[in-house]
Image (spheres, rainbow, N blue to C red):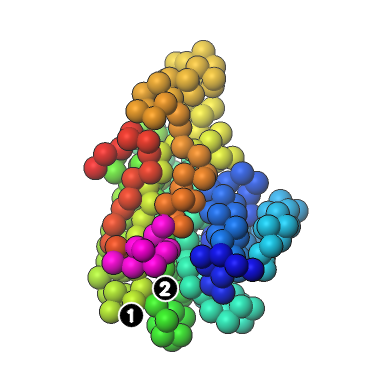
């Protein structure tokens, strides 16, 4: 299959959900000829449907379950992808927990804090380390892209673990970029504003009530009105940024945290 990423293999964690950011990213790369690895906590019917959609676009696809909070499973994910396709050229750390919303003073340490940090931050480290080791061994360089958030730049109420993990993810991006550049591996983060995925829909329900809106629709309308571009983000917006960061045109860009927010976040 022809395309800008023909012969390249991309692994996207947390990509087994319909209309999720992970699916949107894989669709964009599939359309450009990449081999695609769908990975999520479980390869269920929904993840298999994501894989079938990618095959219908002409991509070669593998499905690999991975709990990113476990370092051994992250290593196995990369090993299996290399075994299937010969290399891992692009890793997108997309898996995340953003639906545990609670005031800071009520957060449970083991559940609302430890689990979010384990998936959003530790999981990205485990996958980055595993993929980078494979990239270094292959000697062809590579691209690692972390899906952070507007919450990596700005604080939000009732999301202390999420905001902390995403700020930490920008730190991991910078630290990794410093060490991996000599191997031809770039590491960057993408910071989307709110995107109404399945996870985003749960946030819509919670924050519309918290902020006193009569309905989710009113909350979304207010969100759109505050954005310079007049709408919340779409999975395709984040996917487009990933395409560029993974391209040859961006080979000299590393350690960056790129806002993709329609102008809502500008630092």
Label placed on residue 142: 2
Asked whether the viewer can see residue 258, the reply is yes
Q: Position of residue 105 (x, y in %)?
A: 35, 35
In the displayed structure image, the side of residue 34 where residue 232 appears, left or right: left
Residue 164 visible somewhere in the drawing: no
What range of the chain is rendered magenta? Answer: 244-252
Circle 2: element type = strand
- In reply to whether residue 248 is colored magenta, the answer given is yes
User: In terms of depth relative to the viewer, which is nearer, 265 or 13?
Assistant: 265
Assess whether residue 264 is covered by the magenta stretch: no
- The earlier-in-sequence mark between 2 and 1 is 2
Q: Position of residue 65 (x, y in %)?
A: 64, 65
Q: Where is residue 172 in the image (x, y as percent from the top left)?
A: 32, 62
Label 2 Cα neighbours within 10 Å, binned few <14 / some 14-19 / many ≥20: many
Q: Quadrant of residue 193?
A: top left
Rendered position, 168 above or below 141: above
User: x, y (%) of residue 109?
Assistant: 41, 48
State the SS at label 1: helix
Q: Which residue is depicted at the point 53% across and 72% down?
A: 8
Q: Are marks 2 and 1 in contact (CB under 8 Å)?
A: yes
In the rendering, which numbered label is found on residue 128?
none
Q: Eyeballing the image, is 91 above or below 79? A: above
For this rendering, which residue is in front, 164 or 174? 174
Q: Residues within 10 Å of mark 1 (few under 14, many from 20)?
A: some
Q: Quick one: quadrant of the N terminus?
A: bottom right
* Residue at numbered disc 1: 183
């Amino acid at each position: 299959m022809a395309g800008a990423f023909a012969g390249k293999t991309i692994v996207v964690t947390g990509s087994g959900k319909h209309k999720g950011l992970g699916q949107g990213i894989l669709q964009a790369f599939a359309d450009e000829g990449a081999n695609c690895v769908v990975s999520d906590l479980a390869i269920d019917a929904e993840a298999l449907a994501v894989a079938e959609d990618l095959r219908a676009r002409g991509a070669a696809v593998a499905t690999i379950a991975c709990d990113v909070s476990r370092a051994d499973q992250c290593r196995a994910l990369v090993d299996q992808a290399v075994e299937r396709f010969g290399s891992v050229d692009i890793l997108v750390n997309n898996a995340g927990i953003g639906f545990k919303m609670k005031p800071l003073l009520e957060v449970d340490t083991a559940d609302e804090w430890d689990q979010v940090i384990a998936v959003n931050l530790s999981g990205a480290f485990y996958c980055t380390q595993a993929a980078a080791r494979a990239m270094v061994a292959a000697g062809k360089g590579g691209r690692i892209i972390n899906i952070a958030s507007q919450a990596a730049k700005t604080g939000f109420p009732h999301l202390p673990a999420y905001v902390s993990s995403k700020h930490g993810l920008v730190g991991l991006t910078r630290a990794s970029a410093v060490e991996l550049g000599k191997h031809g591996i770039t590491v960057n983060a993408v910071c989307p504003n709110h995107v109404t995925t399945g996870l985003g829909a749960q946030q819509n329900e919670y924050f519309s009530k918290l902020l006193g809106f009569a309905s989710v629709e009113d909350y979304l309308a207010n969100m759109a009105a505050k954005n310079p571009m007049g709408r919340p983000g779409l999975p395709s917006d984040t996917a487009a940024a990933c395409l560029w960061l993974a391209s040859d045109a961006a080979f000299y860009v590393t350690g960056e945290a790129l806002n993709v927010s329609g102008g809502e976040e500008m630092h």
